[in-house]
Image (cartoon, grey):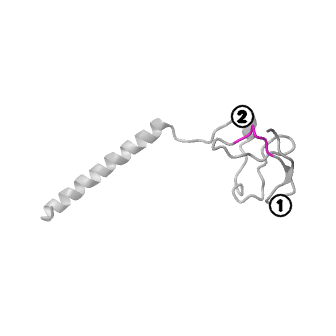
Amino acid sequence: MGQSPSYQCNYGCGTDIHFDDDVKSESGKSIPLESSGEPHNCPKNPYNSGKKSTGSILAGRQKPATMSDVDIKGTLSNIQSRLKSIEDKLTAVLANNGVE
């Protein structure tokens, strides 16, 4: 398929953008591109307001910082341990008050 025709940005900044079937986000959504081929990060897009650009998505192919599976499992294990401790304390309090 390739490159689409040019369109003006929906947010009113006046930049001509196009889409390329070969340039998608990790979730599969099309990324708007400027005539230079760089992603268009519109300053009028509410999602981009107040965010600083971390450089070209295409040049570095950088992924956003995310927790690894190991980090997630460790965090989940910590939460489960803390929950168990709270349950044990609650059971003790209830037992001391004659509630089963």
**Residue 59 badge:** none
Residue located at (75% from left, 35% from top): 59
Q: How crowded is mark 1: few (under 14 residues within 10 Å), some or many (20 or more)?
A: few
Instruction: Classify the position of the C terminus by image quarter.
Output: bottom left
Q: Which residue lies furthest to the left in this view?
A: 98
Task: Please say if 92 is above or below 78.
Answer: below
Q: Position of residue 26 (x, y in %)?
A: 64, 41
Q: Which residue lies furthest to the front in this view?
A: 1
Specify whether 39 is left or right of 93: right
Q: Position of residue 87 (x, y in %)?
A: 26, 54
* Kind of residue at badge 1: Gly
Residue span colored magenta: 19-24
- The foreground one among 7 and 95 is 7
**Residue 60 badge:** 2
Residue located at (34% from left, 47% from top): 80
Specify whether 94 is left or right of 20: left
Residue located beneath label 1 in the image: 12
Residue located at (75% from left, 37% from top): 22
Quarter assignment of residue 75: top left
* Total residue callouts: 2
SS state under label 1: loop
Q: Which of the two marks, 1 or 2, is nearer to us in this view?
A: 1
Q: Where is residue 1 in the image (x, y as percent from the top left)?
A: 79, 39
Gap between marks 1 and 2, in whole Å? 28 Å
- The foreground one among 57 and 21 is 21
Q: Where is residue 11 in the image (x, y as percent from the top left)?
A: 79, 60
- The foreground one among 87 and 1 is 1
* Kind of residue at badge 2: Gly
- Sequence-wise, the earlier of marks 1 and 2 is 1
Residue located at (28% from left, 54% from top): 86
